[in-house]
Amino acid sequence: MNDKQKKPQKLKARLPRGFVDRTAGDIRAVNEMTAKIRGVYEHYGFDPLETPLFEYTDALGKFLPDSDRPNEGVFSLQDDDEQWMSLRYDLTAPLARHVAENFNEIQLPYRTYRAGYVFRNEKPGPGRFRQFMQFDADTVGAPGVQADAEMCMMMADTLEALGIKRGDYVIRVNNRKVLDGVLEAIGLGGDDKAGQRLNVLRAIDKLDKFGPEGVALLLGPGRKDESGDFTKGAGLNQEQIDKVLFFVGIKVYAESAARLFELVAGTSRGGEGVEELNFIAALVTSAGYGPDRIKIDPSVVRGLEYYTGPVYEAELSFDVTNEKGEKVVFGSVGGGGRYDGLVSRFMGQPVPATGFSIGVSRLMTALKNLGKLGASEIIEPVLVTVMDGDVEAMGRYQKMTQELRAAGIRAEMFQGNWKKFGNQLKYADRRGCPVAIIQGGDERAEGVVQIKDLIEGKRLSGEIEDNASWREARVAQETAPEADLVAKVREILAAQAEDRKRAGGNV
């Protein structure tokens, strides 16, 4: 029998499925983008709010199929008092809880924005993560659709602030009341028709994917795809299908509004919804937002669970290349609508609310496609190298580093094994450091430093072939008094910046 103890197994480093690590570039890109979004929201008079990642599960109120362990759709745990808590799946439900809990202290209308991570306990896939960032803006306590119109205008301004030009985006607006009115007008009103109504809404939502012909099949008998799989239809007759297709096929709303009003006349909510759409169209037009920016579009179907009035979606209309190499329209990067019932369920009284959410990760992908993100320069730190390890030398190196930092120059003192100087320059090269500061014993005795332009040095090593070129080149290394360190480093960084500018940003 082998009495030798088994070696403990080395722990395997592995990232949980559906989650990602964010690198410095990603973080800076998000920070750059969210700063611009925040600027627009603040300009509109919205104030920030932060709610915790966890909420009591019953306050979320969306994914609750199992009262014993409500862990479907959300990540849940049981607290020591046996109450279930869940990671938030969006930023709207926590806002509703916050408003209800602090209703007497909040000034209505309450205008707020929030940015943060949300979590979905769902099967991950390509582009589908379990943790992602949203950026929301909401107005609570404003019953008029002028608040919805303002949201649409703020969405348009936000996209333009991010560098997306007119013609590359549109804010599409519909109204859940009109949708309900059309369904009621074709005989699908009442609780007993709820399942059929849902099938119709799902069919409408496939308009961009399958076109009117495909949607007609999904509204009627059903549709078979290329693989032979069959999707059962909503079972509408031809007259019903024609009315639904007319509704979602409206291209120029002003030309079809009267006919749409006739279609929903006599329904409990449809006429009211058409009037609200007309009001929004008039408001945004008066403010200078034409249909090239904000468009009434009855094909918008979103938020079937809780939207009660206007719904809107920000869509990018330019082409991108997908993973299969195909040109596709980028599509939606955010949306929202009126959710008058969400706060009310805590209050027992009506509390109107409207808001929208931007999908930060998806919008970041769009901006990268347009070359609108990550363009701001991030200069890597100046490296103060270490030649000697005694206290006096180390003190000098640290003093130089702090002087550079105090002057607003990003800098670091080498913290690795200083005894192999070549490794320090390799580190600087891999890090992309623009300048290295070198001071050995001889330089220290003379009160000088060697300042090495690493960017120019790298260029010279690859480009200089004759003496004339050498004479014309910028000096790659020079000696300067310690007192001139900051000024000389600034001079070199300025020259490097000028080179980047002349090269169009490519060193």
Image: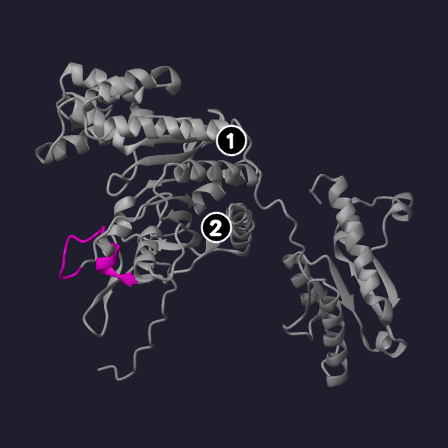
Q: Secondary structure at mark 1?
A: loop
Q: Where is 212 relative to 53, above or below?
A: above
Q: Is residue 220 above or below residue 26?
A: above
The picture quadrant where one finds residue 449 is: bottom right
* Residue beneath the point at 29% across and 15% down: 259
Residue 392 circle label: none
Pointer 1 residue: 287
Query: x%, y% of residue 32?
Result: 56, 50
Residue projecting furthest to the left: 192
Residue 483 vs residue 68, the one in the foreground = 68
Q: Position of residue 31 (x, y in %)?
A: 54, 53
| Residue 303 quadrant | top left
Image quadrant of residue 180? Answer: top left
Q: Nearer the viewer, residue 58 or 323?
A: 58
Give the class, few, some or many, for how many residues have Cα within 10 Å of label 1's Cα (few <14, many ≥20): few
- Residues in magenta, as a range: 55-69
Q: Is residue 481 above or below residue 191?
A: below
**What amino acid type is highlighted by mark number 1?**
Ala
Residue 263 located within the stretch drawn in magenta: no
> Would residue 65 be counted in the magenta stretch?
yes
Res. 188 visible in picture: yes
Q: Main secondary structure of the magenta part?
A: loop
Q: Quadrant of the N terminus?
A: bottom left
Residue 302: horizontal and vertical position, in percent? Answer: 30, 36
Q: Is 371 located above or below residue 90 in the figure?
A: above
Which residue is at the front of the view, 372 or 190? 190
Q: Assign the C terminus to one quadrant of the image.
A: top right
- Along the line of sight, the residue nearer the viewer: 18 or 160: 160
* Residue 46 badge: 2
- For the residues bearing labels 2 and 1, Cβ distance under 8 angstroms: no
Q: Which amino acid type is marked by label 2?
A: Phe
Q: Is residue 29 left or right of residue 177?
A: right
